[in-house]
Amino acid sequence: MKWLPIIFLLSLTLPVVSQEKKWTPPPAIELSKLIGTNNELAEKKVKASWGEKGLKTGKQKWIEATTLVVGVLSDEPVSAVKDDGTLIGELTRLNDDGLYVLAKDIGNFQDVSYQLKTASGKKIGDGKIKIEHYTAPPESFRKEGIPEGALHPHRWKDSKVFPNTDREFLVYVPKQYDGSKPASLLVFQDGLRHADRDLVGGLRTPTVMDHLIASGEMPVTIGIFINPGRLADQSAGAKPKNRSLEYDGLGPDYATFLLEEIIPFVTKEHDLKLSDQPADWAIAGGSSGCAAAWTAAWERPDRFGKVLGWVGTFTDIRGANVYPSWIRKTERKPIRAALLGERNDIDNQFGSWPLANKQMEAALKFMDYNYHYWWGDGFHGSRHAAVMLPEMLRWLWAD
């Protein structure tokens, strides 16, 4: 009995060792080279990622760059077939236990569903493939010797334009700003994710700005990265319900919100001097955030003289589909626009995003706007915009 307290005390000092094993994805590109040349090693690498239980489901897949790897256990040969009947490839049997694996570069810009079918026609698995792969530009990464701007967090709960909303935003102040002369301004919708310096596949906008300001390809520019508003009944971190009203809606409200609430607060809080020239003020965003950026400039070209946007929602959600017509019928406004469209963007009940952006491009050309439209084969999202951001910002700020 005398030993019991001692044993108890010793047990409290023992470290807790986690038994959880971190999952590692199969090396798809490496497997594509091993299969057929070293099936034994390929088998080991597949099993190191996927256990037997998972392989029995027929749902094990991984994508690395543009290479797809799928694995399944089967008693007979297996094929991977798109839902339209197109063959993706025949799986290779790697061992006597019926482990079948396909590792193949199937090309970029794929958005398809597939099935795994046996030689007898039995479906033993399925999945969905979405591939949109780009190589990130060097400006997306921090580099020694490039001064980093500071990011200051804020929260705004006192809006009069959008009452009962709560939102976060970040203010970027470049290292080179010293107040000796007025700075330019760049406002980003859906701001926090676009301000994340470490988000894989993200825009990493502050880092891009660091590079371009340091190289002189962009002026010393203050950044405001602002999120749409959550409603009062929403919990922190919830998807903002006020986003569509703020971003897709027409009229001056969003511009007024920025000009009368957010920007005055930022300049006062951080003792900033901003240029009073519209050509020094840019506003940016993707999807509905792009529509918001255009609306702000359209309503207040006396303040926002530049627009940067991608996969713009110029469709009939809250009326932004009218812009191609309005552009054609309205005296040209002093707006310089850098825009990016995707040929495989959304097509649904609200309209066709590729068609809507083609109509915007045609209208801007017809009215001789100062614009540039880039086009890609990607989907709805920010992946292409992330690699195009340095080029688009260079063009937007070029003389």
Image: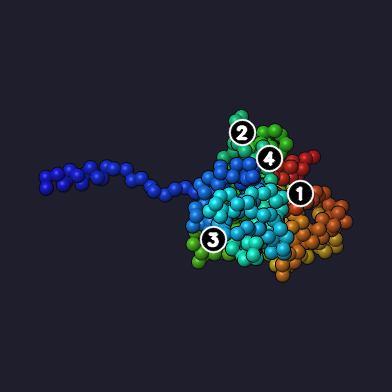
Mark 2 or mark 3: which is in front?
3
Residue holding disc 2: 143
Q: Quick one: which residue is furthest to the bottom in this view?
A: 349
Q: What separation in Å lies between label 2 and label 3 (alpha carbons)?
A: 44 Å
- Tell me residue 75's x, y (percent): 57, 59
* Label annotation for residue 57: 3
Residue 342: name its quadrant.
Answer: bottom right
* Label annotation for residue 137: 4
- Tell me residue 222's x, y (percent): 64, 43
Q: Is residue 362 above or below residue 316?
A: above
Residue 138: name its quadrant.
Answer: top right
Crowdedness near tag 1: few (<14), some (14–19) or many (≥20) residues, C-alpha within 10 Å = many
Q: Are marks 2 and 3 in contact (CB under 8 Å)?
A: no
Residue holding disc 1: 338
- Tell me residue 286's x, y (percent): 68, 54
Q: Which of marks 1 and 2 is nearer the N terminus?
A: 2
